[in-house]
Image (cartoon, rainbow, N blue to C red):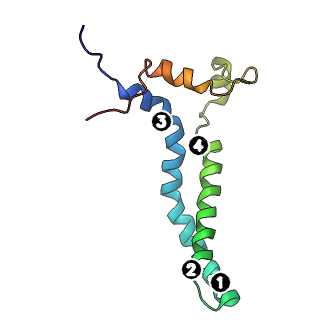
Amino acid sequence: MAPRRRQPQKALAVLRAYLLPVEVAVTVFPLIAALIVVPVAIRGYRRRGRAGGWPVLVFYSFVFYLLATLLQTVVPLPADTDGHCAVTRYAERPQLEPLAFRGTVSTAAEGDWAPPTC
């Protein structure tokens, strides 16, 4: 019996829909950070007498989190929503089974949960 070849492309195709908004967030975040760096520095300097440190890191991490959350909702939307909704029946009824996504990913990856090897 020949060893089964793994096809990580199928598993990555399933995850691609979730990775695209994160890639966009990583691309857009420096632009947003450049726009708000001066007001944040002024506010931090007036409050604490310095413009840096942990509060700034926490603030920018929160801004990135908000941006990634927003893009997880906005970026995957198709251009033709009427045509997409007429064909796709993804959320017809609520999915109330915990961990049901494992079956979906397993089906798409043909049951192979092992990490890809080079």
Q: Left or right: where does residue 29 sit relative to residue 92?
A: left
- Marks 2, 3: nearer the viewer: 2
Front residue of 5/74: it is 5
Q: How far apart are the alpha carbons under marks 3 and 1?
A: 38 Å
Residue topped by disc 1: 44
Q: Give SS at disc 3.
A: helix
Marks 1/2 in contact by CB < 8 Å: the verdict is yes
The mark tally for this picture is 4
Identify the residue at image location x=51%, y=50%. Answer: 24
The mark that comes first in sequence, 3 or 1, is 3
The mark that comes first in sequence, 4 or 2, is 2
Residue type at tag 2: Gly
Residue type at tag 1: Gly
Q: Is residue 21 above or below residue 97?
A: below
Q: Residues within 10 Å of mark 2 (few under 14, many from 20)?
A: few
Residue topped by disc 2: 53
Residue located farthest toward the bottom when viewing the structure as drawn: 49
Q: Give SS at disc 2.
A: loop
Residue type at tag 4: Val
Q: Residues within 10 Å of mark 4 (few under 14, many from 20)?
A: some
Residue type at tag 3: Arg
Q: Give SS at disc 1.
A: helix
Q: How far apart are the alpha carbons under marks 1 and 2?
A: 9 Å
- Marks 1, 4: nearer the viewer: 1
Q: How far apart are the alpha carbons under marks 4 and 2?
A: 32 Å
The mark that comes first in sequence, 1 or 2, is 1
Identify the residue at image location x=43%, y=17%. Answer: 110
Q: How far apart are the alpha carbons under marks 3 and 4?
A: 12 Å
Q: Residues within 10 Å of mark 3 (few under 14, many from 20)?
A: few
Residue topped by disc 4: 75
